[in-house]
Amino acid sequence: MGNILTSSIGKKLIMSITGLFLIFFLLIHLLANSAYLFGPEAFDAVIEFMGSPFIVVMVPVLAGGFVLHIVYAVFLTLYNMKARGSQRYEVTNKAKTDSWASRNMFVLGIIIGGVLAFHLTHFWAKMQLAEFTGGHAQNGNVLMAATFSNIWIVICYIIWFAALWFHLTHGFWSAFQTIGANNDKWLGRLKFVSYLYATIIFLGFTTIAVFAYLN
């Protein structure tokens, strides 16, 4: 079991599984946040649901999946750098799947992780974490208004969503390819779904951020 988890194939498999888990979470998170577009009451109702025992239990599971994704991303990056050795910067013929996003997944991941930390300190820490530690959770609508009233924060978030778009356009289909959907027939379909999904995520979160700024 240990050899599987530490082998190159095992690392890629764990990256794919945890990546698909986080992809599913992003969609759920977008659907929940979309309630903000329908008024304070709708958003408050969603926030109340997010405080339910089931969601609270899912938080450490999500955190664990995210940590595993990061850890194995670092392992794979270092492994690939070591494998390339002195040929690390040599330009070779690139495969059809070797996109800009695929060559910069680690850098995109750093951008995503950095803004995610900022996001957690402005929302999760002041709401779910505050309530979990016995404090008073701040109102979600108030936090949205306070955070997105700053145009530079809005721009920072849009850059985050753009990094997510690039990360997802490669990560989505690559995850399915790793777990077995790697024939030519499915590759084209998965790439189409990847771009469609990534675009929905980008436009959805960007719309919410801009809406919060304008309101």
Image (spheres, rainbow, N blue to C red):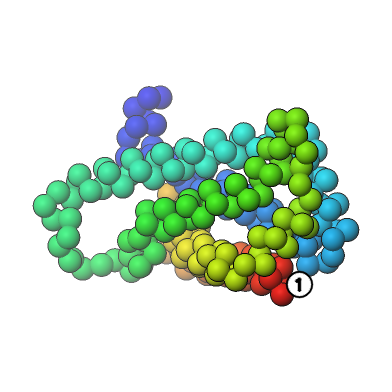
Query: In x, y percent, where is residue 180?
Result: 46, 49
Instruction: Look at the picture and state if 69 lies above or below 140.
Output: above
Image quadrant in which you'd find residue 102? bottom left
Image point (79%, 50%), residue name = 139
The kind of residue tagged 1 is Asn
Regarding mark 1 in the picture, which secondary structure is present there?
A: loop
Location of the C terminus (image quadrant): bottom right
Q: In this view, does 16 lie above or below 34?
A: above
**Residue 200 visible from this viewpoint:** no
Counting from the top left corner in percent of width and height, residue 103 is at 32, 61
- 63 horizontally vs 77: left or right: right
- Residue 159 visible? The answer is yes
Q: Tell whether 176 sits left or right of 1.
A: right
Which image quarter is the N terminus in?
top left
Identify which residue is drawn at 68% across, 54% down.
29
Q: Where is residue 99 in the image (x, y as percent from the top left)?
A: 36, 67
Q: Mark 1 points at which residue?
A: 215
Depth order, front residue of 55/134? 134
**Residue visible at 37% across and 57% down?**
107
Q: Which of 188 and 46 is in front in this view?
A: 46
